[in-house]
Image (spheres, grey):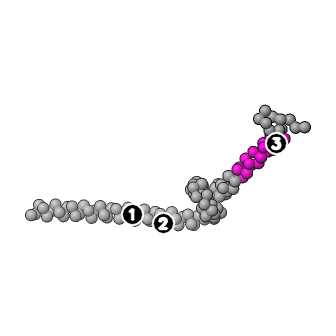
């Protein structure tokens, strides 16, 4: 005969409920690890962009497309040549923007000084 607990549940049912709670916790932990698999892979590969990949995984991983994109990104090899090309293009773009800003400022000053010369002459 099974013993009844104060809450009205017999001991055998209580063990079953406890076991279900443990299995539920294991299932949640497994789902969480599966969800973060792209971030874990990126960290294991010591990628320099692992933090950015983790952010994408956390924010967009709930969509299946976002999760697979993060997984492909984590598995994709990063070569030094590719990184140097990206760095070179970035430096050129920054230089272009800086030069354009300097030229625009010089042109604006040139217009202002020409207007001042015309006012003084007139």
* Separation of marks 1 and 3 at Cα, in angstroms: 71 Å
Q: CA distance from mark 1 to mark 2?
A: 12 Å
Frontmost of labels 3 and 2 is 3
Residue 83 in picture, x, y percent from top left: 55, 63
- Which disc number belongs to residue 89? 2
The secondary structure type at the circle numbered 3 is: helix
Mark 3 and mark 2: span between their CA atoms? 66 Å
- List the residue tagged with mark 1: 97
| Dot 1 or dot 3, earlier in sequence | 3
- The mark that comes first in sequence, 1 or 2, is 2
Q: Is residue 66 left or right of residue 90?
A: right
Q: Tag on residue 13?
A: 3
Look at 78% across and 32% down and name the residue there.
6
Question: Mark 1 near mark 3, Cβ–Cβ under 8 Å?
Answer: no
Q: For mark 1, does the 10 Å Cα neighbourhood hold few (<14), some (14 to 19), or many (20 or more) residues?
A: few
Q: Which segment is the magenta one?
A: 12-30
Answer with mark 3 or mark 2, whichever residue precedes in sequence: 3
Foreground of the two, 88 or 115 = 115
Q: Residue at x 60, y 54 (%)?
A: 58
Residue at left offset 30%, top offset 64% = 104
């Amino acid at each position: 005969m099974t013993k009844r607990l104060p809450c009205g549940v017999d001991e055998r049912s209580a063990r079953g409920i406890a076991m279900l709670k443990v299995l539920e916790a294991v299932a949640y932990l497994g789902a969480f690890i599966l969800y973060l698999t792209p971030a874990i892979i990126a960290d294991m590969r010591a990628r320099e962009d692992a933090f950015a990949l983790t952010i994408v995984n956390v924010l967009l991983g709930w969509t299946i497309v976002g999760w697979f994109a993060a997984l492909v990104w984590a598995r994709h090899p990063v070569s030094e040549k590719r990184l140097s090309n990206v760095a070179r293009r970035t430096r050129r773009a920054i230089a272009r923007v800086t030069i354009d800003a300097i030229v625009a400022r010089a042109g604006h000053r040139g217009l202002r000084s020409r207007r001042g010369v015309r006012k003084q002459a007139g």
